[in-house]
Image (cartoon, rainbow, N blue to C red):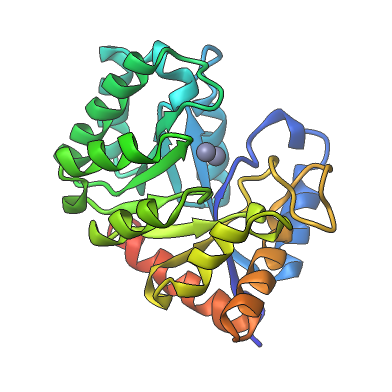
Amino acid sequence: MTDAWLVDSHCHVDMPQFDADREAVLERARAAGVGRLVLIAGFDEQDGQRRALALAERLSAPVAAGVHPHEARLFSDAIEDELRGLARERRLVALGEIGLDFHYDHSPRDVQREVFRRQLRLARELGLPVVIHTREADEETCALLEQERAGECGGVIHCFTGGHELARRALALGFLISFSGILCFPRAEVIQQVARELPEERLLIETDAPFLAPPPHRGKRNEPAFVVEVARKLSQLRGTTPEAIGRAAAANLARLIDARWA
Ligand SMILES: [Zn+2]
Ligand SMILES: [Zn+2]
């Protein structure tokens, strides 16, 4: 086993939840074998994107930026221009996370749809893959991805919690599917079934830290080191080793983002 055999393809280590012990968290990630983590810069009322962009620069870590569906009501021409600028400076490896969240409905659904559509168009314009957040909106997410020809820029369904139909249509578009700690929850049977059947070249792993810690850490703050639990669960489901899962995820992540990350 090499030292760095894992990736965390989606985390929010820039968030204030890590302010007290960020270096220790990053050190534990390294010690656990996480060679690479992708930061997500989300625009919000406090210019939260700047935190992740600054941390990414300091760590030389890849970063994606976008307007989360929760924050869709904040989307503006100015933000679109800022995203365009960041992409032109080659500071982004992907646009995201973007999508639809009909579970929380923090932004009105028609606003979410419109902002998702605009960011999908922007991704195609910029030639960036997309990081998709979708919750209780499988059908509409698929329809929008297809209508906006998201297959041309590619991307990943992050923190997969959907059904077989979402998986099937995402794969048809050439997308990757990323599993989080939710895969390890006892009642995640459908997600586990999707994980069993997924072609190896399409799988990714992530924590979405600080959210959704997998067992045995459930209920606590999540952190990138815990991605090992996701790799372990996937290896059990697929009859392979955690190392093989880690290697596949690292290769798939590299294929997704390395064209923008010299
Ligand atoms: Zn998300
Ligand atoms: Zn996230």
Q: Answer with left or right where residue 122 lies relative to residue 209.
A: left
Q: Is residue 8 among what the camera can see?
A: no
Residue 187 in the image: state x and y as whole percent: 69, 54
Residue 138 in the image: state x and y as whole percent: 39, 41
Q: Answer with left or right where residue 72 lies relative to residue 59.
A: left
Residue 87 in the image: state x and y as whole percent: 28, 38
Question: Which residue is more in the foreground, 187 or 261?
Answer: 187
As displayed, is residue 6 above or below residue 22? below
Residue at x 70% of width, y 60% of height? 184
Q: Quadrant of residue 147?
A: top left
As displayed, is residue 94 above or below residue 141? below
Q: Give the position of the N terminus as an image quadrant.
A: bottom right
Q: Quadrant of ligand 2?
A: top right
Residue 32 in the image: state x and y as whole percent: 74, 68
Residue at x 49% of width, y 27% of height? 49
Q: Answer with left or right where residue 156 lies relative to residue 187.
A: left
Q: Is residue 116 among what the camera can see?
A: yes
Q: Quadrant of residue 72?
A: top left
Q: Give the position of the C terminus as an image quadrant.
A: bottom left
Residue at x 46% of width, y 14% of height? 107
Q: Answer with left or right where residue 218 lies relative to residue 208.
A: right
